[in-house]
Amino acid sequence: MSYQLENTQRGEKYNTIFSKVSPAKRRNRTARAHWRSRLLLGLYLALMILPIYWLINMSLQTNSEILGSMTLWPQNLTFDNYIGIFTDSSWYMGYVNSMLYVAMNMLITISVALPAAYAFSRYTFIGDKHLFFWLLTNLMAPPAVFLLPYFQLYYSVGLFDTHIAVALAHCLFNIPLAIWILEGFMSSVPKEIDETAYIDGYSFPRFFVKIFIPMIRSGIGVTLFFLFMFSWVELLLARTLTATDAQPIGMIMTRTSTASGIDWGTLAAAGVLTIIPGILVVYFVRNHIAKGFALGRT
Amino acid sequence: MNKVYNNRAWLLVLPMLILVAFSAIIPLMTVVNYSVQDVLGPNASFFTGTEWFKTMLNDEALQAAFLRQISFSLIILAIQIPLGIGIALIMPKRGWQASAVLILITLPLLIPWNVVGSIWQIFTRGDIGLMGWGLRELGIEYNITRNAGDAWVTIILMDVWHWTPLVAMLCYSGLRSIPEAYYQAARIDRASKWAIFRYIQLPKLTNVLVIAVLLRFMHSFMIYAEPFVLTGGGPGSATTFLSQSLTTMAVGQQDLGPSAAFSLIYFLVILLVSWVFYTTIMNMQKDKPPHGGA
């Protein structure tokens, strides 16, 4: 590169012609700025982790220790709270239920959102802009507004207290979100690729699955993360549409509060367990998140 | 990109349309139907016209809840957006540290909303929670069930804790998309850090910031489970937000007519504000020269 002048011979990558600050001083400055930002980030992460640490801490204590004296870490380490959850089917079925409807929702959403997003990114058709805005309005619809009608609708079609009911209900906000994100990714793929594929004799379905989907892998990764996240954490609709068979873990947790007081240890352990599936999902899509919305428009 | 005019594209949209219609249009029609009726029983209802809308618009408790809601949303936007950008700027860019920070930072987002409420309820309790205990040791009187100010501080703190990661995550991926050449050019011009932020990073972030602001606004407007678990809307009605008022009215008291009318007003307000946000930001982007933002 032309702006690296005489210093390149000494392995220095900046010019000294225009800069009054010596390279050594400048290196020092950037190093200090670097450590300052690391320190700030560390501070933020530490503060952010504190409530979660407290939850883990409580989950490893007995109730008498939690309510007794203030201890910053478990004095009598116990795993009884976790064992209790894993041996009681009414508890662990809550996790199974949650995971089932989240998985169903991700599957349904992504399979209808992919073709729809493709249509929005490649074609104009009658009413496309209105349709897109209407989709966004569903993202804005407060679930509280739909509680009662949902209950009646799903009850009348015999879907009440099934996993599919919750999965379908979560489509209300997940499909629009998925289309919004995917459309951004798809628009950044040059159209020439579609055309070349057609010239080469690919049919639309084959082109879509073999060529197009691999090209927007990151986009699909990010989308799946968001679908998982919003379906996993939503409880207002999930609670209203289930009674016993498909109850999410978040609702089962309310059982820890009984007439004899709250079972803090079990509550905390159950809370810790709700975080774990999320960590797994983030781990698998972390590289995609980093690239993430980079490609997305709005 | 030049799009081709093709009405067969409707075929690709159709499955999505059927699903969304099932979960959006049919329920919404039920809401509209209820809002103009007085429902006394399964087969007994009569037409009331716009009476429920008038009652709801003049209800002082709801007006108060609405003001609370607006102030809450504005406060958290004012804190979370700058904080999120700041965090994104200092996050490591590559290597294992980047992955580790990314995973850590998303943790609060992956906790079910009522569990978030429970965590903070425990965390702020004076007898068993670290924060409540710490404040008490420092001699600060802090009680979220009695003092409305404390309850507000806690709810804002909780929301910032819970949702700033989303803003940070979006901004981080926005920052990653800036080509290295821009920074090199800035280095040659000896641009200050502030100039780099103002003229390179911020314009490149507009796209993700639109998503962040819209998502945060919409979600903060629908906040329900967290304050409900944390304080139950109390003390008094100091932290009762719109969703909670609505749920109490519809599910708790079974006031179908009034709550349906309230739902529609609530929905229209969110729609209107989000639409104003959306079009203003879109127009701002349109005014810029093509190489600026998009």
Image (cartoon, helix red, strand yellow):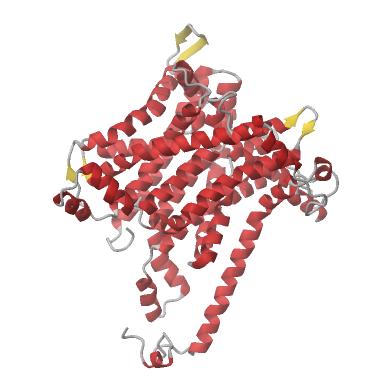
Which quadrant of the structure image shows residue A42? Answer: bottom right
Residue B178 placement, left or right of A236: left
Residue A71 placement, left or right of B39: right
Q: Residue furthest top?
A: B44
Residue B121 position, x and y percent, is 70, 42
Q: Which residue shows up at 73% across the image and 45% down it?
A: A59
When the figure is inspected, residue A196 is found, relative to residue B20, above or below; the finding is below
Residue A27 placement, left or right of A181: right
Residue B43 position, x and y percent, is 48, 6
Which quadrant of the structure image shows residue A9? Answer: bottom left
Q: Is residue B146 visible?
A: no
Q: Which residue shows up at 44% across the image and 39% down it?
A: A106
Number of marks in the image? Answer: 0
Residue A164 position, x and y percent, is 47, 28
Front in this rendered view, residue A82 or B36:
A82
Residue B218 position, x and y percent, is 47, 41
Q: Residue furthest front?
A: A87
Q: Quadrant of the C terminus of chain B?
A: bottom left
Q: Residue furthest left?
A: A199
Residue B167 placement, left or right of B68: left
When the figure is inspected, residue B108 is found, relative to residue A34, above or below; the finding is above
Q: Residue furthest right?
A: A69
Q: Which residue shows up at 39% across the image and 90% down it?
A: A8
Q: Is residue A178 visible?
A: yes
Q: Which residue shows up at 52% across the image and 79% down it?
A: A30
Front in this rendered view, residue B131 or B115:
B115
When the figure is inspected, residue A156 is found, relative to residue A46, above or below; the finding is above
When the figure is inspected, residue B125 is found, relative to residue A285, above or below; the finding is above
